[in-house]
Image (spheres, rainbow, N blue to C red):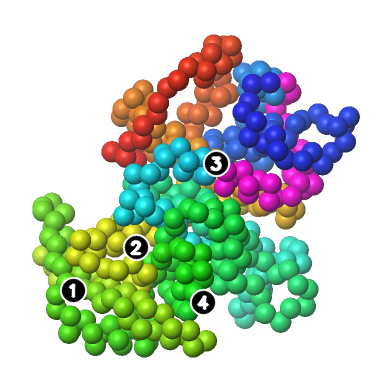
Amino acid sequence: MLFPPVFSAIPEPRQLSKVTYPIAALAFTGILMFLTRLGARRQIGLLLRSQASQQKFLNLFGVSVPHGDTLNAVFASIDPQEFQNIVASLVDRLIRKKILASSRLLDRYYLVAIDGTGTLTFHQRHCAHCLTKTQGDTTTYYHPVLEAKLVTAQGFAFSLHSEFIENTMPGATKQDCELKAFYRLAAKLSARFPRLPLCLLLDGLFAGGPTFSLCRSFNWQFIIVLKDADLPSLNQEFDALVELEAENNLLVTSPPPQQRRQHFRWVNDISYRDSLHHLHSLQVVECREHRGAAASQGKKFKWVTSFQVQKSNVLELTNQGGRVRWKIENEGFNVQKNGGYRLEHAYSTDLKSAKIFYYLLQIACILTQLTEHGSLLTAQFPRGFGSSKNFALLVLEAWRTCSFDFEHFSAFLRQPFQIRFSFDSS
């Protein structure tokens, strides 16, 4: 069988004498479904069972292409955490191989953006773990997830860890929420990457004493969006002190055609006492930005951070740090929802299977990003494909119709080669 042992550590829940399709074959089928943007399990039987595709599966796994229902049935008997471990191990390998070292903030910290998004939504109760939202006479049952994605200014957004937001205690008076999920996620992230220098990029929901204390206990840095209505005492201190510290400002103008003017102001070592009476020393930095000649195009950004802000690092902390948080929305959730992966589609109504399909989607996104930005592909197709969806269509057709010599392919993989990344085009 020609396939890397990525899924070999997953315990087999079935009787070995009755196993037809190994877990690796099932997992690969799910990943291939997402890589080629099929959009539904039923499409596996319709589009992935060509003669060339069957031959590839025989060479890779010694079996034919499994049916989508087979994936669903087997995944329902596996602990989803096994697949979460694989997602984390893939990114861990990229980190250990120093693939992402050049994207670190201040040449040290890996940027991890944390935010929530929706996955499954139903008009009737799906399971005992559903969250509910009622508007008028209509109740919606849904399953959100809190994602920690390792993001880079160049455009990568890799899932590092996921925490599903769900009600686990029957009859509880309060539902699970992003904040509760954040504390669980942070503990798991610290346990999985105990010595990795991290900088968390968070929105204003997480701006508060518990987050500050948690990051300090894990030795993490943070850059958190600070809105004018958030932490009133901190904002008031900043407004009062920033006028007195005139030296803490920087004006930067970029040349045409961008013509972006950024005015930075900051205050270090602001004392903030939270609701639990814990004292924190924080930094606040503000950026007022204008593009072009029209003053009406101006925007204001503000963050609270654990970093000491100086003229020498304010540009990197903001433009290559705080503002990179948007990568989890654009390159992360938006691509997965609207780029053909169909994140919000119910690939299964079984909760275990649905979570595993979610993790397979994350693996497919990691592979797609590495492939699309890799030098092997850009060297062969310097003009690109027009869009990521077009690339997925070509991958599908190649898989369905092309045959190749697996012995030659195996020999090729044994030879040393290097892949570099290019971000000149999308």
User: Of the residues shown, which amino acid type is indicated by label 4?
Assistant: Pro
- Label ID, residue 210: 4
Disc 1 target residue: 248
The residues bearing labels 2 and 4 have C-alpha atoms spaced at a distance of: 20 Å
Q: Is residue 309 left or right of residue 254?
A: right
Q: Nearer the viewer, mark 2 or mark 1?
A: 1
Residue 86: in magenta span: yes
Query: Percent x, y for residue 176?
Result: 64, 72
Q: Relative to residue 24, is residue 166 depicted above or below? A: below
> Mark 2 highlights which residue?
322
- Asked if the residue under mark 1 is in contact with the one under mark 2, i.e. CB atoms within 8 Å, the reply is no
Residue at the spot x=22%, y=67% of the render? 310
Residue 208 lies, with reference to residue 140, above or below; the image says: below
Which range is magenta?
62-90
Q: Is residue 71 visible?
A: yes
- The crowd level at tag 1 (other Cα within 10 Å; few <14, some 14-19, many 20+) is some
- Where residue 240 appears, as percent x and y from the top left, is 24, 88
**In the image, is residue 57 part of the stretch drawn in magenta?**
no
Q: Which numbered circle lies on residue 341?
A: none
Magenta part, dominant SS? helix
Which three-letter amino acid code belongs to the residue tagged 3? Leu
Q: Amino acid at mark 2?
A: Gly
Q: Are marks 3 and 4 in contact (CB under 8 Å)?
A: no
- For marks 2 and 4 on the same chain, the one whose residue lies earlier in the sequence: 4
Mark 4: few, some, or many residues within 10 Å (few <14, many ≥20)? some
| 363 vs 390, nearest the viewer | 363
Q: Say which mark, if any, is on residue 90.
A: 3
Label 3, label 4: how far apart the Cα atoms are: 30 Å
